[in-house]
């Protein structure tokens, strides 16, 4: 079973920054579209950003200009740099690895991000 290891969540004040990390097995990381999703209480899980093995990125409109997704292919690790955090960014953030076509390889266990004003 594929395991994704997340880290980096926490409690911050609005306007501050956090960086999330997600490590994946090399056999998956090299070929997967890696992404971050989030789920706030009472809401559906939503895509925050994803990054292809080629480096192509995609962002939700709500985080464009504030969040940056990146991947270190040597370390088999994906990052989400979150700047100018807002209370509405509060959620559990999940790392995801998926096929380009045809479904997921794995989900991470989730890491809590809480932003207070």
Image (tube, helix red, strand yellow):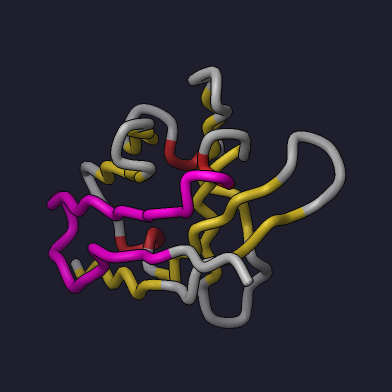
* Nearer to the camera, 26 or 110: 26
Quadrant assignment for the C terminus = bottom left
Relative height, residue 108 to residue 85 (above, below): below
Q: Which quadrant of the structure image shows residue 50?
A: top right
In reply to whether residue 41 is colored magenta, the answer given is no
Residue 108 pos. (x, y %)? 50, 68
Q: Position of residue 12 (x, y in %)?
A: 15, 66
Q: Residue at x 31, y 32 (%)?
A: 74
- Count of marks overlaid on the render: 0
Residue 7 image position (x, y, % from top left): 28, 65
Residue depicted at 34% across the width and 44% down the height = 80
Give the camera-side residue of 18 and 66.
Answer: 18
25 over 34 or under it: above or below = below
Specify the segment rendered in magenta: 5-27
Q: Would you identify the image quadrant in which residue 45 lies?
A: bottom right
Depth check: 111 or 77 in front? 77
Residue that sits furthest to the front in the current view: 27
User: Residue at 45% of width from left, 54% of height from top?
Assistant: 24
Query: Which corner quadrant holds the N terminus?
Result: bottom right
- Residue 24 is a magenta residue: yes
Viewer-nearest residue: 55 or 27? 27
Residue shown at 38%/42% (left/top)? 76
In the image, farthest residue toward the bottom: 42
């Amino acid at each position: 079973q594929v395991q994704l290891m997340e880290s980096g969540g926490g409690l911050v004040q609005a306007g501050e920054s956090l960086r999330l990390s997600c490590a994946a097995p090399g056999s998956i990381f090299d070929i997967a579209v890696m992404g971050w999703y989030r789920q706030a209480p009472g809401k559906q899980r939503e895509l925050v950003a994803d990054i292809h093995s080629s480096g192509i990125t995609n962002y939700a409109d709500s985080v464009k200009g504030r969040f940056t997704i990146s991947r270190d292919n040597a370390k088999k690790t994906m990052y989400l740099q979150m700047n100018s955090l807002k209370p509405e960014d509060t959620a559990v953030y999940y790392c995801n690895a998926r096929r380009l076509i045809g479904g997921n390889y794995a989900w991470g266990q989730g890491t809590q991000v809480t932003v207070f004003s």
